[in-house]
Image (spheres, helix red, strand yellow):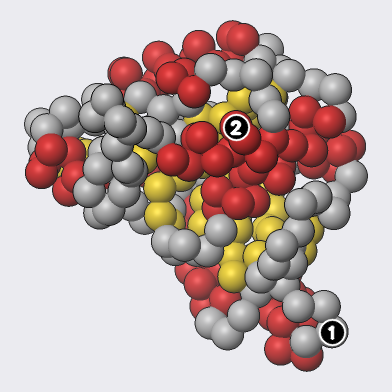
């Protein structure tokens, strides 16, 4: 059976996709077969033929070098840069849980390590039409533990704490934290690291600096985060 992990963020644009690319690259370089998956992706551009390009998936594939076909990475792709539930209302094609799960199961059948990335933060509405689906519903349905990606700067203690408390309230295991935009030696950011570990009981397993092309985390420790 494959091993799985969910990547959430403390909010939009904290660097989930950037970090996911580094994670998949590390896994591939360690010699395991790795796959990327995202239930829904909004804010995408169109190709010359008019089809939507799943931008996050394409970025991860290019950075990591994984062999997984792009069309298997995300079942729902939208153009409007809003929450998936609203994008689907505006563009049609509302998200169905079974379609999401079917794609995820296919990834799990074909690869040793499957990394699912969320949309926005953990409290993200995925569908609000015929069915009410929240991102945490998807995480639980896929039986995933969670890694939080957070901006290392001001406000992250509150953002990480609230995300961790939400995960705990929904019985989603917190496997660790990754700080993005980290500046080594910055007194506030170094303190943020300590405070977030104290507040959540989870370790900051890696710190990513702007421009990093490698994840400073051993392959063994990274793989241990997956279940």
Residue 117 location (% of width, % of height):
51, 41
Viewer-proximal residue among 183 and 58: 58
Q: In the displayed structure, would residue 161 be above or below residue 74?
A: below
For marks 1 and 2 on the same chain, the one whose residue lies earlier in the sequence: 2
Residue 185, labelled with which disc?
Answer: 1
**Residue count near mark 1 (Cα–Cα under 10 Å), binned few <14, some 14–19, many ≥20:** few
Instruction: Specify whether 129 is left or right of 137.
Output: left
Q: Is residue 115 visible?
A: no
- The percent position of residue 82, horizontal first and vertical second, equals 25, 54
Proximity of marks 1 and 2: CB atoms separated by less than 8 Å: no
Q: Is residue 139 above or below residue 112?
A: below
Location of residue 105 in the rendering, given as x and y in whole percent from the top left corner:
49, 14
* Viewport quadrant of the N terminus: top right
Q: Position of residue 22 (x, y in %)?
A: 71, 45
Q: Quadrant of the C terminus?
A: top right
Name the residue: 51% across, 30% down. Answer: 37
Q: Is residue 62 above or below residue 97?
A: below
Can residue 32 be seen here?
yes
In the foreground, 195 or 208: 208
Q: Secondary structure at mark 1?
A: loop
| Image point (32%, 18%), residue name | 99
Residue 115 appears in which quarter of the rendering? top right
Residue at image coords 24%, 29%:
50
Which of pointers 1 and 2 indicates the residue nearer the eye?
A: 2
Dot 2 corresponds to which residue?
A: 61
Q: Is residue 159 left or right of residue 82?
A: right
For marks 1 and 2, give the CA distance.
32 Å
Judging from the image, what secondary structure is the residue with disc 2 in?
A: helix
């Amino acid at each position: 059976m494959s091993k799985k992990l969910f990547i959430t963020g403390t909010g939009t644009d904290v660097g989930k996709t950037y970090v996911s690319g580094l994670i998949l690259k590390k896994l591939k370089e360690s010699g395991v077969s790795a796959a990327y998956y995202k239930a829904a992706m909004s804010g995408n551009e169109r190709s010359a033929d008019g089809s939507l390009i799943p931008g996050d998936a394409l970025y991860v594939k290019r950075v990591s070098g994984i062999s997984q076909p792009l069309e298997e990475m995300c079942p729902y792709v939208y153009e409007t840069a809003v929450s998936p539930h609203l994008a689907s209302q505006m563009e049609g094609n509302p998200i169905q849980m079974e379609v999401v799960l079917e794609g995820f199961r296919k990834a799990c059948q074909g690869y040793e390590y499957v990394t699912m990335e969320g949309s926005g933060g953990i409290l993200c509405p995925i569908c609000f039409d015929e069915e009410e689906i929240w991102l945490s519903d998807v995480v639980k349905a896929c039986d995933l533990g969670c890694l939080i990606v957070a901006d290392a700067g001001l406000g992250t203690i509150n953002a990480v704490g609230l995300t961790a408390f939400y995960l705990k309230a929904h019985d989603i295991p917190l496997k660790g934290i990754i700080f993005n935009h980290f500046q080594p030696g910055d007194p506030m950011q170094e303190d943020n690291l300590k405070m977030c570990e104290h507040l959540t009981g989870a370790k900051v397993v890696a710190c990513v600096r702007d421009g990093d092309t490698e994840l400073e985390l051993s392959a063994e420790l990274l793989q241990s985060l997956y279940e």
